[in-house]
Image (cartoon, helix red, strand yellow):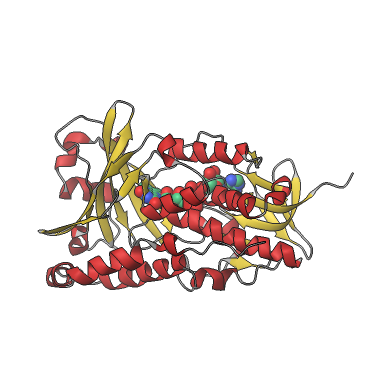
Amino acid sequence: MEPQIYDVIIIGAGPSGLSTALHLHKYRPSITSSLLVIDKAAFPRDKLCGGGLTSDAEVLLNDLGLDINELPNTTSENILFRSGDFEFAFSNSNQHTLRIIRRLEFDLWLNKKARQRGITILEEVVVIDIDPTENFVKVFTPTTTFKAKIVVLAEGSNGTLTKKVFPHRKVKKARLIEAISSSKNDRVRSDSVFDFSPIQNGLDGYFWDFPSPANDGQNNCVGVFDANTHHKTPRSLSNYLFSNYPDFSKQIKREEINGHPILLFDPQHRNQAGQILAVGDCAGADPLFGEGISFALGSGHYAALEIVESLKKGDYQLNNYQQRIIESPMGRSLFIRWAISNILFPLRWKICQFFIWKTLNGIVRYLATNHILGWAKKVKSPIEGL
Ligand SMILES: Cc1cc2nc3c(=O)[nH]c(=O)nc-3n(C[C@H](O)[C@H](O)[C@H](O)COP(=O)(O)OP(=O)(O)OC[C@H]3O[C@@H](n4cnc5c(N)ncnc54)[C@H](O)[C@@H]3O)c2cc1C
């Protein structure tokens, strides 16, 4: 018997891969039996991440009929933005500003929700290569070769397949380190801090401090995001954390610090080649904050729309995907974040940072409220009869 040719194979069962699968199921339930998700990991699997969900991520989850309150989480009423001595609080008028979950639980929860809707997920199967032919894409694992009309790359920031499909991309990767402080101390509080003071010391980024859910109360999640785009000073981010924030050495042991890169969004990157498209981190995460979960969920929505329309037409070339993303509220938010990161990070002199944060405070708030956050509310529901 001829092996099945799947309509869609998704490589990676993180938030972007499962969002694509869940949106495909939502927009065209009949596709479910011809949809396969493959992940090399066994779930529950952890992913180094602060677990901060913005309201955009919550809007997208709600639209999928998923209630994040089923998971242990903690919320921050305010986000405190800092630069040097300057600080301002950003809050949502009628709800929390940030919700923090643990990725181990979040990704397992998404996995279970997808399975409950009939989506097949193969775990502990690594995709070693893909090969597009005229009519379908071959997906190679060590034991089986699958075939699909369309393949979605959702393999995260360290994927090797993305490099193969988009060999000419000039990739920029941010460096991040993070540690969870479980010590019960007086720093436990509910606001989340984004401290951009490190820019003045030549770092393209910020230092964060979130509350994080713990089984017996609350932990703190601290870390450093270095977009690594303008200042390429080789330095240890751990040393940076300890020398600039000596308080941490009292709460966090060096060996508890872990690092992971993030592939950054660039408006010039192509994320579609023939019948293959990229979502989530392998398409590029936010270059200003390194926020990736909402964009992983959002790109799953746009990928599903593109795929459903292509399957309907019987043309699997997905040629509108790039334009669809660029013109979307999500694409505009990513573009604005990219533009701001290119202004904010190179201007490392104290006077410039003071001017941006203090004098332009109204503009900073306006951008944060209207363009950086809140894009998911503007995402258009698909047309009837999709
Ligand atoms: C330190 C740190 C802190 C962060 N904090 C935040 C935060 O607070 N808020 C936020 O929004 N974002 C944060 N991010 C970014 C966020 O973690 C990512 O944007 C998000 O995980 C992207 O989801 P994804 O589905 O694209 O990729 P991933 O979550 O990386 O999932 C990719 C999946 O693909 C699988 N895979 C890879 N290769 C293969 C293969 N060849 N075959 C089969 N399976 C494969 C992997 O096993 C994995 O399960 C942080 C990132 C870091 C590094």
Q: How many marks?
A: 0
Q: Is residue 113 left or right of residue 247?
A: right
Question: Residue reaching furthest top?
Answer: 216
Snapshot quadrant of residue 273: bottom right
Q: Position of residue 113 (x, y in %)?
A: 56, 39
In this view of the protein, can residue 264 be seen by the observer? no
Q: Position of residue 59 (x, y in %)?
A: 43, 53
Residue at point 22% right, 41% down?
A: 190
Q: Is residue 367 left or right of residue 284?
A: left
Q: Position of residue 216 (x, y in %)?
A: 29, 25
Q: Which quadrant, please, contains the C terminus?
A: bottom right
Snapshot quadrant of residue 161: bottom right
Q: Nearer the viewer, residue 195 or 92?
A: 92
Q: Nearer the viewer, residue 210 or 245?
A: 210
Q: Is residue 98 left or right of residue 168?
A: left
* Position of 269 relative to 35 (above/below): below
